[in-house]
Amino acid sequence: MQIHVVGQGQTLFGIAQAYSVTADEIARANELPDPSRIVVGQSIVIPIDGQFYWVRQGDTLFSIGQRFGVPAQELAQINQITLEGRLQPGTRLYIPPRAKTNAESNAYVEPMGETVSENLIASARSRAPFLTYLAPFSYEVNRDGSLTAPPLNNFAAIARENNAGLMMVITNLEEGAFSEEVGAAILNDEAAQNRMLDEIVSTAQNVGFRDIHFDFEFLRVEDREPYNQFLRKAAARLKEQGLLISTALAPKTRADQPGQWYEAHDFRAHGEIVDFVVLMTYEWGYSGGPPMAVSPIGPVREVIEYALTEMPANKIMMGQNLYGYDWTLPYEPGGEYAKALSPNRAVALAYERNVPIQYDQEAQAPFFEYTDDEGAEHVVWFEDARSIQAKFNLMKELGLRGISYWKLGLPFPQNWLLLRDQFNIRKF
């Protein structure tokens, strides 16, 4: 696969010619509703095996080979050129595909209300072939340890048909928000814990869950050790039933990081107790905060590198957003919330407003600015093929277990194209 960034005056037909494919193939792969509506700065995945590279001034076969991890001799042979010959700038070289990396992937799916929308069902069905786990969000634990289930529709069947494990997500949500009171009630009451674990085991057996995933957030600092002790108890009980156990962890960069989202999450203990963790490495740019990339590569790396000091890489799933935000400017704390939008919708919005897409090299994230019909200024930060490729490169560099997506239902076809191209996704 190749990532192409649309330049000024380019058309999909012309881009296709450069890569020896058809415009229809590119449009289908990228789910472009109208192939004529492309935007300067938009990244497009070209559906080819391997990729092409156009020689730049000063390039040699050895430097190109180092860049792509291919021996210079192999490049010379494939492209039918001599190893010692001088490369002319502008020459197109074919770069063969590299070996795939083994990895796991998870995606949360969040039904809203009492039913599952057709859009979510379709999204789960189309993306399950790329997943190790499918995670309906969420079973909410009540203060007495009983569980309130989400609507599941046919998620279990979708997971089973695609050899994906169904993940049972348990949260301390109450009335739409993570509750320290619910967390405290469960983590300090043996009877409530026992009831919850009984219901988890029964539900897992009846529905077919393979992993039990605890996403307890906004806990009191004094519940740090009670949470660790509960996880030890839960792990022993769940492993007896042949179930995996995992947790979601806030994006910390040091053990003593202050703040209620962080203090009760003990990375070292979780790494020792559970089978794997999901690091929530997103939401630096969030709906109520100032405009910025949702998951800038630098902060993401810092969180993962800290986590690697506390647990092995094969227990770490990197969290990744499948969305962006549209902020109205000027940003005012406590003011209007940014609107979430999919990467596909972001590109369509840039086209509608006739503005180019820019790319922040430091954050490794795309963005653009526009003016709405009322004259208000906006800035949109989202994800594209380049930004997700940066995360895939980080996964491979650090040898992580895999990636976990929040959340299905927001179209981002380039992600799945690149995931399939570069990783062998583990299945059950």
Image: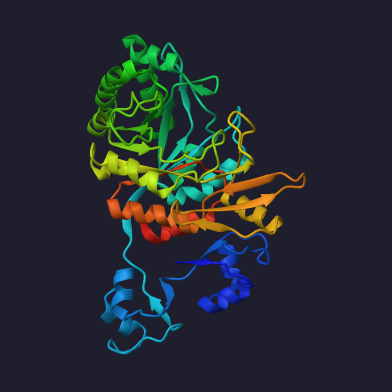
Q: Nearer the viewer, residue 134 or 189?
A: 189
- Look at the picture and state if 75 lies above or below 160: below
The tally of labels here is: 0
**Which quadrant is home to the N terminus?**
bottom left
Q: Position of residue 52 (x, y in %)?
A: 43, 75
Q: Residue at x 57, y 62 (%)?
A: 41
Residue 89 sits above or below residue 276 on the image: below
Residue 409 visible in the snapshot: yes
- Could one spot residue 416 in this view of the protein? no
Q: Position of residue 147 (x, y in %)?
A: 45, 19
Please give left or right for residue 305 compared with residue 114 in the image: left
Query: In the rendered view, how is the structure colored?
Result: rainbow
* Foreground pick, 416 / 324: 324
Displayed quadrant of residue 115: top right
Horizontal side of residue 142 vs 96, given as left or right: right
Residue situated in front as seen by the camera: 242 or 290: 290
- Identified at 71% across, 56% down, the residue is 352
Which residue appears at 36% of the width and 73% of the height? 96
In the depicted structure, whether residue 121 falls above or below residue 41:
above
Q: Residue furthest right?
A: 374
Give the side of residue 424 with respect to residue 118, left or right.
Answer: left
| Residue 35 on image: x %, y % | 65, 66
> From the viewer's perspective, is 119 left or right of 211?
right
Reply above or below: 161 against 252. Answer: below
- Dividing the picture into quarters, in which one does residue 21 lie? bottom right
Residue 381 position within the rendered picture, expressed as x and y whole percent measured from the top left? 55, 48
- In the picture, which quadrant includes the C terminus? top left
